[in-house]
Amino acid sequence: MALRLLVDECLSPVLVNVGHQHGFEAHHVVHRGWEQIRLFDIALRTALTLSNPPDLVNTILEVDVDGSVRAYDLPEEES
């Protein structure tokens, strides 16, 4: 079974080509069209339930593909 790569949206789509050059199956999430609009809508609706107007400074919202949301504070940096 060949190794498959999924390049995150915060990384350059050009990395897919680099993966292909090395013989890997590679895809970029932007090119996959994976429910991004629906998940972003869920994230924004959740933000509005936390505070209105939303104050998400140092807050992480994780939205899973099933629509579940986890909100938590960004961990403090260790000294």
Image (cartoon, rainbow, N blue to C red):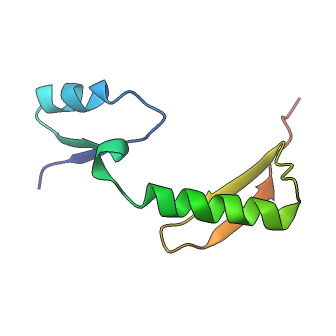
Q: Residue at x 65, y 60 (%)?
A: 43
Residue furthest front in the image: 53
Location of residue 1 (image quadrant): bottom left
Q: Is residue 8 left or right of residue 48?
A: left
Residue 22 in view in this figure: no
Q: Quadrant of the C terminus?
A: top right
Q: Is residue 49 left or right of residue 33?
A: right
- Count numbered badges in the picture: 0
In this rendered view, identify the residue nearer to me: 22 or 51. Answer: 51
Picture layout, residue 56 above or below residue 72: above
In this rendered view, identify the residue nearer to me: 55 or 27. Answer: 55
Location of residue 5 (image quadrant): top left
In this rendered view, identify the residue nearer to me: 19 or 53. Answer: 53
Q: Residue at x 32, y 30 (%)?
A: 13
Residue 78 in view in this figure: yes
Picture layout, residue 50 above or below residue 20: below
Picture layout, residue 70 above or below residue 17: below
Q: Residue at x 86, y 40 (%)?
A: 76
Picture layout, residue 35 above or below residue 23: below
Q: Residue at x 22, y 41 (%)?
A: 26
Residue 27 at x, y percent in the picture: 25, 43
Residue 20 at x, y percent in the picture: 14, 32
Location of residue 58 (image quadrant): top right
